[in-house]
Amino acid sequence: MEIRPECVPCLLKRVLFQAELADNGSEMEALKAAMDAFSRGLRKGRNSAEIATEVHRAAYRAMNVKDPYLELKIRADAVAGEFIDTASHHISSSGDPVRAAMLIACIGNIMDFGIEKAIDDPDRFREEFNRLIGEGLGHDDTDIVKDILSKAKSIVYLFDNCGESQLDKLLIREIRKKGIKVTGVVRGAPILNDVAIDDAYRTGLDKELDGLYTTSEFRIGIDMNAVDTALREEMASADLMIAKGMANFESLSDQNVTMPIAYIMRTKCAPVADALKIPLNTNAVIVRGRTERKKDLP
């Protein structure tokens, strides 16, 4: 996705948010480093996730903190974990467990700290859960996903944020019940509140999967050319990629991915919503890429 002017203040706000989390007096240094990165890399036509990676890499170096979001990530996982039983009941009693599990996975994406249309405090998820369930899916390509899954042998599941990853477990369980192999992918290093490998092991995410890989680097989203050989081979044989959240869409939308991708997210910023042609603040399951049902693609 091409970066837009309004991405700049949004990114700088997030840099300040994480520098305040670091709590070591590095706010000015982090902001200066971020603005220097912008001055070098900001230009029309560049991918938003690539520039965000450069900005956050510079800010993290200035903060000199490996994982400023760690405490928030742990709290988010704990709060989301409180809803596993309720969400499981919603899925099992729905009559369409895969669609219900995709909605559950989708609403977890509201846990995205430091941006305007998400929540900055994991405890707020308790207030939002029932409301978001009630909204349902504002854009619903789940029938296309289910059609792909009916013929699939393996999929790749690209995780996004901590907290929501606990609810992702429920969708993964529904998919694996069908005898489908699920390979998970997390970030190659701690970045924002995204799931990194230590977070996956801490929360038992690895035990829900048939395989677990990382993106191999500090990056917003994923660069398909940077992943290691083993993951590249898994992706080559997969029938579907499920990509959670906006950052994965931003990075993947400009790359050549041969398998269909099901993006599951809450549209929390105008540039992403506009790129998808979906209203802001929408729970969405969107299929892009090559499928056997191209006529059904939005």
Image (cartoon, helix red, strand yellow):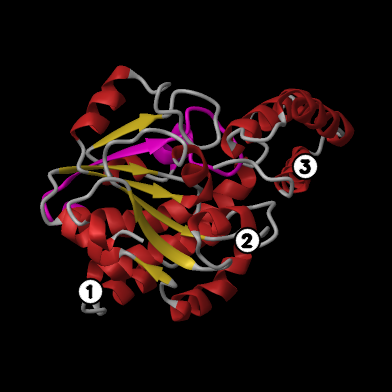
Quadrant of the image for the N terminus? top right
- Categorize mark 2 by other alpha carbons within 10 Å: few (<14), some (14-19), many (20+): some
Q: Amino acid at mark 3?
A: Leu
Which image quadrant is residue 51 in?
top right
Give the alpha-carbon distance from disc 1 to disc 2, as whole Å.
Answer: 27 Å
- Categorize mark 3 by other alpha carbons within 10 Å: few (<14), some (14-19), many (20+): many
* Region rendered in magenta: 176-202
At x 50%, y 38%, the residue is: 251
In the rendered image of this protein, does residue 127 appear above or below residue 148?
below
Viewer-closest of 2 and 259: 2
At x 59%, y 41%, the residue is: 2
Q: Amino acid at mark 1?
A: Asp
In the picture, measured across the screen, residue 13 lies left or right of residue 120, that is right
At x 75%, y 37%, the residue is: 22
Q: Secondary structure at mark 2?
A: loop
- Is residue 193 rendered magenta in the image? yes
Q: Position of residue 53 (x, y in %)?
A: 62, 31
Q: Secondary structure at mark 1?
A: loop
Of pointers 3 and 2, the one earlier in the residue sequence: 3
Q: Which residue position holds label 1?
A: 96
- Is residue 105 rendered magenta in the image? no
Of pointers 1 and 3, the one earlier in the residue sequence: 3
Q: Secondary structure at mark 3?
A: helix
The answer to whether marks 3 and 2 mark residues whose Cβ atoms lie closer than 8 Å is no
Q: Position of residue 223 (x, y in %)?
A: 45, 28
> Is there any visible trace of residue 273 in the rendered image?
yes
> Is there any visible trace of residue 111 in the rendered image?
no
Give the alpha-carbon distance from disc 3 to disc 2, as whole Å.
Answer: 16 Å
Q: Position of residue 139 (x, y in %)?
A: 41, 68
Q: Which residue position holds label 2?
A: 118
Q: Which residue position holds label 3?
A: 12
Viewer-closest of 286 and 226: 286
